[in-house]
Image (spheres, grey):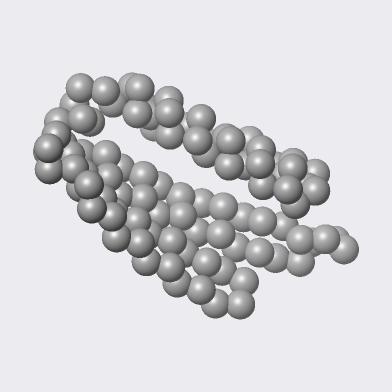
């Protein structure tokens, strides 16, 4: 499986794009995540948005499982970020992937 990773940064924003392809199972994944850091009442807020898309044979066979796994990975990321950064937790609940 090949993987390409692109990172764009400025002072308070980082955008990461990744794409990979597995020719053995004729499938592809793309993902983009944007992280924004802003001052917030004596602390810092971390805003995160992102999207992932799986296409090809894997997507048609296991779309539900892929969606659930993606949601779990994102929740784990937010939980770990809050723990490591000493945060108060999310201001809003993370949005689940569309069905």
Which residue is pictured at 56% across the width and 59% down the height? Answer: 35
Task: Decide which of 89, 57 is in the foreground and name it.
Answer: 57
Question: At 72% across and 44% down in the image, what residue appears?
Answer: 82
Q: Quadrant of residue 76?
A: top right
81 or 13: nearer the eye? 81
Which residue is pictured at 28% across the width and 55% down the height?
A: 3
* Residue sitting at the far bottom: 11
**What quarter of the picture does the C terminus occupy?**
top left
- Can I make out residue 81 in this image? yes
* Left or right: 48 in relation to 99: right
Q: Position of residue 32 (x, y in %)?
A: 40, 54
**Residue 61 percent location from the top left of the image:** 20, 22
Q: Quadrant of residue 18?
A: bottom left
Q: Is residue 50 above or below residue 79?
A: below
Q: Position of residue 66 (x, y in %)?
A: 35, 28
Q: Please, is residue 24 above or below residue 85 in the view? A: above
Residue placed at 73% from the left, 48% from the top?
84
The percent position of residue 91, horizontal first and vertical second, equals 71, 43
Q: Is residue 60 above or below residue 74?
A: above
Q: Residue furthest right?
A: 42
């Amino acid at each position: 499986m090949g993987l390409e990773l692109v990172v764009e940064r400025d002072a308070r924003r980082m955008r990461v794009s990744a794409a990979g392809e597995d020719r053995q199972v004729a499938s592809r994944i793309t993902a983009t995540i944007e992280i924004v850091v802003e001052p917030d009442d004596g602390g810092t807020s971390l805003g995160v948005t992102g999207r992932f898309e799986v296409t090809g044979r894997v997507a048609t066979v296991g779309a539900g499982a892929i969606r659930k796994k993606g949601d779990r990975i994102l929740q784990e990321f937010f939980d770990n970020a809050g723990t490591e950064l000493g945060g108060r937790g999310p201001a809003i609940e993370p949005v689940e992937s569309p069905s």
